[in-house]
Image: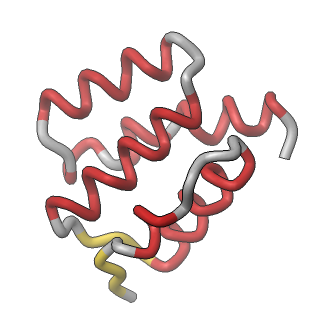
Amino acid sequence: MDEYEIARRASALPDRFATRLPADTLEGLKEMEGGGEYGELTIELAATLATTGALVTTAEQGELRALLEATGMPTRPVDELTVRD
């Protein structure tokens, strides 16, 4: 995954998960996206989803894992997600 693909995919995350996030977290994620902080955005999103117990699909879990790996971030928060299918 190149930097443009990372940016494209990570930029879509705040809106995609908006209904499953606290408002202050969503605001922070949008600020990170605007600043190009895609790895930080992804790990903060995954950690918040895990902490709040928000449901994610297997595909969403895979997407978050791929972005964390592509940005060199730890993947542990993805392992703690509540997955439904």
Task: Choose between 9 and 70: the one closer to the eye.
Answer: 70
As drawn, the residue found furthest toward the top would be 35
Establish if 74 lies above or below 85: above
* Residue 39 rendering spot, x and y as whole percentages: 57, 36
As drawn, the residue found furthest toward the bottom would be 85
| Residue 26 in which image quadrant | top left
* Residue 58 rendering spot, x and y as whole percentages: 49, 79
Q: Looking at the image, which residue is at 63% across and 41% down?
A: 9
| Residue 63 in which image quadrant | bottom right
Q: Looking at the image, which residue is at 21% across and 33% down?
A: 25
Colouring rule applied to residues = secondary structure
Q: Is residue 22 left or right of residue 35?
A: left
Establish if 63 lies above or below 43: below
Q: Looking at the image, which residue is at 81% across and 30% down?
A: 3
* Residue 78 rendering spot, x and y as whole percentages: 45, 66
* Residue 65 rendering spot, x and y as whole percentages: 59, 62
Q: Work out which quarter of the rendered image holds the C terminus and state it.
A: bottom left
Q: Looking at the image, which residue is at 46% across and 42% down?
A: 13
Establish if 79 lies above or below 46: below
Q: Is residue 29 left or right of residue 22?
A: right
Total residue callouts = 0
Q: Is residue 58 left or right of residue 1?
A: left
